[in-house]
Amino acid sequence: MQNGWERTDFEVFEIEGLEHRMQALIEKVRPKFESLGHTYATYFSGKTGDEFFPHVAKHARRSVNPPKDSWVAFAPYKRGYKAMPHFQIGLWGTHVFIILAIIYEVPDKVQIADRLLKNKNLFKKLPQDFIISGDHMSPESTPLKTAHKEQLEYLLNRLRDVKKAEFLVGRHLTSEEAIKMSGKDFEAFAEETFDSLLPVYNIVVNKN
């Protein structure tokens, strides 16, 4: 990503109306996601030994409500990513998110949750500024350092027991913080985040 994030990237989500917001997303934000998509598909392919593919959000099913966030996802499958654990870089109007996501379409959530519950110590090794969340449709999250064992266990148990449950872990970067970074600085930050998430991903996909 040659140019870093700009204030206008985040202001896209303040534009009224589906058509106008989509036009701004396509013209302003999507080229950055496509650039990041190329960079990190190559990164994940090299790190995991599996070929990863980028999936830039198209928001194609929307007919009325404009998107409140947008993203590029990374998964080892060319035709889609939602039915498998995947990584994302994305924007809300308030922040950038860099996450590992297990969303409600993933079929083997029970086994994934069991593996993560057995390996909870992995979360203690994550950087202090990481967050966890149980809903990819919400910008809200809980800082991992204040989540304590109970919140983490609650979200993982919910992932195991509730059909529509989700689990996200990663980092948020406020729009103010992101705007101050150069494109290279942001890519280094994202890579450092993904480096920390890969051991968790390996447990999630049962890869030793």
Image (tube, grey):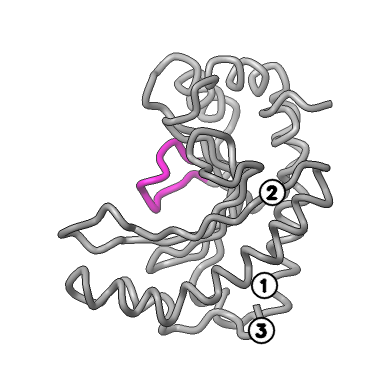
State which quadrant residue 54 falls in: bottom right
Magenta segment = 133-142
Residue 97 appears left or right of 68: right
Q: Nearer the viewer, residue 105 or 121?
A: 105
Determine if the magenta segment contains residue 193: no
Q: Position of residue 130 (x, y in %)?
A: 62, 49
Q: Position of residue 151 (x, y in %)?
A: 51, 29
State how far apart marks 1 and 2 are (Cα).
Answer: 21 Å
Q: Nearer the viewer, residue 101 or 129?
A: 101
Query: Which one is earlier in the sequence, the residue at label 1 or at label 3?
Result: 3
- Residue identifier under label 1: 186
The residue that appears at 58% across and 36% down in the rendered structure is 85
Q: Position of residue 14 (x, y in %)?
A: 27, 74
Q: Nearer the viewer, residue 1 or 198?
A: 1
Identify the main secondary structure in magenta.
loop
**SS class, disc 3:** loop
Residue 64 appears left or right of 169: left
Query: Which one is earlier in the sequence, the residue at label 2 or at label 3?
Result: 3
Looking at the image, is 122 positioned above or below residue 15?
A: above
Looking at the image, is 54 positioned above or below residue 121?
A: below
State which quadrant residue 182 falls in: bottom right
State how far apart marks 1 and 3 are (Cα).
Answer: 10 Å
**SS class, disc 1:** helix
**Mark drawn on residue 2:** 3
Amino acid at the residue labelled 2: Phe
Q: Position of residue 22 (x, y in %)?
A: 30, 72
- Residue identifier under label 2: 52
Instruction: Please tell me whether mark 1 or mark 2 is closer to you in this view.
Output: 2
User: How would you rate the neighbour count of disc 3 (Cα within 10 Å): few for under 14, some for 14-19, many for 20 or more?
Assistant: few
Query: Which one is earlier in the sequence, the residue at label 1 or at label 2?
Result: 2
Amino acid at the residue labelled 3: Gln
